[in-house]
Image (cartoon, helix red, strand yellow):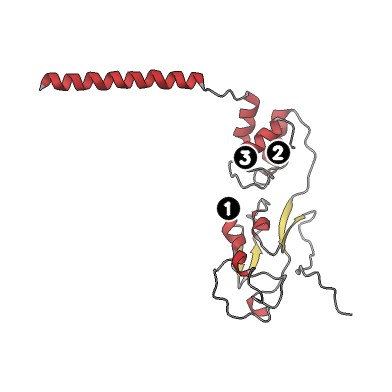
């Protein structure tokens, strides 16, 4: 019995040693060298992977910056701090920019919308937008909150069926813009703390 236990332990130790050697060899054989500068860029990213920079994720944006295919100021989540760090790593001069934030070009909540019959389909804007006559205005907010669902920063909410942006939380990643099937959310340069916009996206000419 004792000899059996000893043999089992020896076999396990031998297997462990063999696997350790194999993994060590594989690590050396297929090791991918990452340039130190690229690693610094990757570490400088916020890791949100929101796509607001125009790339799939933070790592892809870091590679684009490293290869000179993107500027240092494309990360909406990191803002000025990340842009300055990227510029420092790459030895670039950072020009002062103006932040972009989403604006909902619709001001009609559920109470203000006309011709809104009962809708019993899938409770998403993408699905409702495919139904003819879902509401009177073909350019207005549908109110099912696809934009709320995709926002990783809890910066947009539905208030009586109308999307409302919380600019204190918003980082300008534009995920809500991409999620809106009616394209009523637009990125606007915030050149001042207070701005006036027309809360309507219709292209119909005004009546004279």
Q: Quadrant of the N terminus?
A: top left
Left or right position of 8 against 84: left
Left or right position of 20 against 8: right
Seen in the picture, residue 85 relative to 102 is either above or below; the reply is above
The residue at 80%/39% (across/down) is 95
Q: Quadrant of the C terminus?
A: bottom right
Please name whichever residue, 24 or 104, is drawn nearer the observer in this view of the structure: 24
Distance from disc 2 to disc 1, alpha carbons, whole Å, reads 21 Å
- Residue carrying label 3: 58
Q: Position of residue 109 (x, y in %)?
A: 66, 74
Please name whichever residue, 73 or 52, is drawn nearer the observer in this view of the structure: 52
How many neighbours does mark 3 have within 10 angstroms: few (below 14), some (14-19), or many (20 or more)?
A: many
Q: Earlier in the sequence, mark 2 or mark 3?
A: 3
Distance from disc 2 to disc 3, alpha carbons, whole Å, reads 13 Å
- Residue carrying label 2: 83
- Residue carrying label 1: 152
């Amino acid at each position: 019995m004792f000899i059996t236990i000893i043999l089992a332990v020896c076999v396990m130790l031998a297997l462990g040693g063999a696997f350790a050697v194999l993994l060590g060899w594989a690590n050396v054989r297929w090791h991918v060298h990452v340039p130190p500068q690229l690693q610094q860029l990757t570490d400088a990213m916020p890791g949100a992977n929101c796509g607001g920079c125009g790339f799939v994720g933070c790592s892809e944006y870091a590679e684009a910056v490293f290869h000179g295919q993107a500027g240092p100021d494309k990360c909406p989540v990191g803002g000025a701090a990340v842009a300055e760090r990227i510029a420092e790593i790459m030895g670039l001069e950072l020009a002062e920019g103006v932040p972009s934030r989403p604006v909902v070009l619709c001001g009609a909540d559920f109470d203000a919308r006309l011709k809104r019959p009962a809708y019993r389909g899938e409770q998403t804007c993408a699905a409702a937008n495919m139904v003819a006559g879902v509401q009177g205005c073909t350019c207005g907010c549908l109110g099912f909150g696809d934009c709320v669902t995709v926002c990783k920063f809890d910066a947009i909410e539905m208030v009586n069926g109308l999307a409302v942006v919380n600019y204190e939380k918003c980082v300008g990643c534009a995920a809500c813009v991409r999620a809106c099937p009616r394209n009523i959310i637009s990125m606007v340069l915030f050149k001042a703390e207070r701005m006036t916009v027309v809360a309507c996206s219709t292209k119909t000419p005004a009546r004279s």
